[in-house]
Amino acid sequence: MSDLAKMRELSSSVCIVGVDESDELGTLPGKSQLSLHVEAITNAVRDAGLKVSDVDGIFTAGQHSPATIGEAIGVVPRYVDGTTVGGCSFIIMVGHAVLALHHGLCDVAVVSHGESGRSGVGVSPRRDTALPGQFEFPYGFGGAPTYFGLITTRHMHEHGTTLEQWAQVAVSTRKWAALNPKARNRDPLTVRDVLDSRPVVWPFNILNICLVTDAGGAVVLTRADRAKDCAKRPVYVRGAGEGSEHVMLTQMRDLTFSEATRRSGEKAFAMAGVKGTDFDHIMLYDAFTSGPPLMLEALGLAKRGEGVHFFAEGRSTPGGKLPINTNGGGLSYTHSGMYGIFPIIEATRQLRHECGARQVPNTKLSLVNGMGGMLSAAGTLVLSNER
Amino acid sequence: MDLERPLPTPITPECRPYWEGARDGKLMIPKCRACGKPFMYPRVACPFCASRDVGWVQATGRGKLFSFEIAHQILNKAFKVKTPVVLAMVELEEGPRILTNLVGVAPDPKQIRCDMPVEVCFEKLTDQVSLPMFRPVGGGAR
Ligand SMILES: [Zn+2]
């Protein structure tokens, strides 16, 4: 069997059957990171119409290992995965869960995220700093904006993108947040507001940068045959792909084009048998306003330098032709640190047509793409409410 | 004496020649003896051909400003240099890219351009540690 045929066999063999966040999102000094995991898992399992004791595959990234999560929910798992390559890890793990479920290594998989990113409750900082400690921190680098800013400045130099165009990404996303009761920032926003907001690291002002919140989220998956017995309409994982290029920004081969993103998309689209122009809903990891346009470019949906055009009024905005980041994104809804679980949750809700005021009419095919680190790693999913 | 910046730490064994060079005012970079390509950061195998035959050469110290940003706040409390500070990625003439600060220029995006020629200078932090930094060639902004 060819590689493509093997990948195609996985397509739509597994469904997302449950999704949910922790009980609350935002500033939660009364909740530990582990509690955010447990809340999200119990909520998502209930959403699926399953019991926690049905879970036998545990997938998580970040500070807690899947063993800790299994222990916390009282499950002795048959399968664990703790792949941690940044915020996209959860997106990548959906692909890993498809493999494990398809081959019968587990029957009900949960991908779990919990992060006390704002309040730092129950957090034990533990980071590998051997290289940044020598080559980056002495110069003032540290914190994601000081790295993503370099990507953004170079993009402006090579393609003539402007501060106004990046700001429009925040404006479009805020319009969606206004329609999401769970979003943290829902007030109207203009390009001028973004340009006049507090400078952090030029070319970024504070409104170019994601929120910092406490939040959990979980996604429950099972094989398509079993998904029929779950509570909600199943969402098929038609395609999944991953990529990982670098960690240190100096090692990124082309500073304005993410090879990890390109590879993840190529694999996911091939597995699903779709083209970039087929999607009617898109979720992109927006830690910074410049992220989503660069992702569209690396995924091949936009020409290089032209990703920003997708965010024009009437395109990505409510009522537009190709809605993007309909939950309000990391920019306005929530961003706990490793945001990747939340675009999966939103895409699933959109494909179930349960999003109320922000529902994209008749959406059938959703693209989820996220980055880990500074476009260092990437995961792409093709999700659909049809097989 | 209170340092304005965090010292490079931990200096790992494979990176020691880089830091010893910087202390002596030389920008030393690893170079593969098998494929001939210089690289950064230092490691015990070449990232291009995986050869373990790695030596060191002195870089010219010339390069171009590949990208930059102007930091108005620094998260790291150990970094006390007065902001705004220009954080930069420099592409050395030999090819490798490194992160650094651009100095000797106003921290103003209108005064700084990607691809402008830059040259190394060293800021002494302690008797043992100097940091490679870069300034515009010709000593200032146009
Ligand atoms: Zn080599």
Image (cartoon, grey):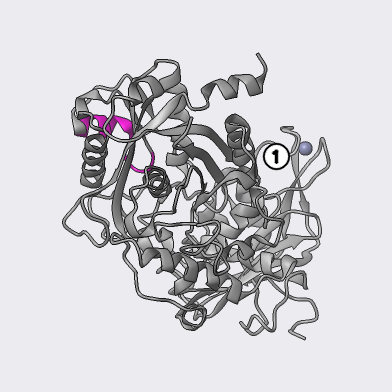
Image position, residue A334 (x, y; %): 35, 59
Q: Which amino acid does label 1 sit on?
A: Pro
Residue A306 visible in this rendered orientation of the protein: yes
Within the displayed image, which quadrant is ligand 1 positioned in? Answer: top right
Name the foreground residue: A46 vs B97: A46
Residue bearing the label numbered 1: B47
> In the rendered image, which quarter contains the N terminus of chain A?
top right
Q: Residue at x 64, y 38 (%)?
A: A266
**Which quadrant of the view contains residue B128?**
bottom right
Residue A372 visible in this rendered orientation of the protein: no
Magenta stretch: residue A150 in it? no
Mark 1 residue's CB less than 8 Å from ligand 1: yes
Q: What element carries label 1?
A: loop
Image position, residue B69 (x, y; %): 60, 72
Q: Residue at x 78, y 54 (%)?
A: B95
| Magenta range | A61-72
Image position, residue A35 (x, y; %): 20, 45
Total labels: the figure holds 1
Image position, residue A346 (x, y; %): 39, 49
Chain letter, disc 1 residue: B
Name the foreground residue: A43 vs B33: A43
Question: Is A105 above or below relative to B136?
Answer: above
Name the foreground residue: B73 vs A260: A260
Q: Residue at x 78, y 58 (%)?
A: B59
How packed mark 1 is, by other alpha carbons closer than 10 Å (few <14, some 14-19, many 20 or more), is some
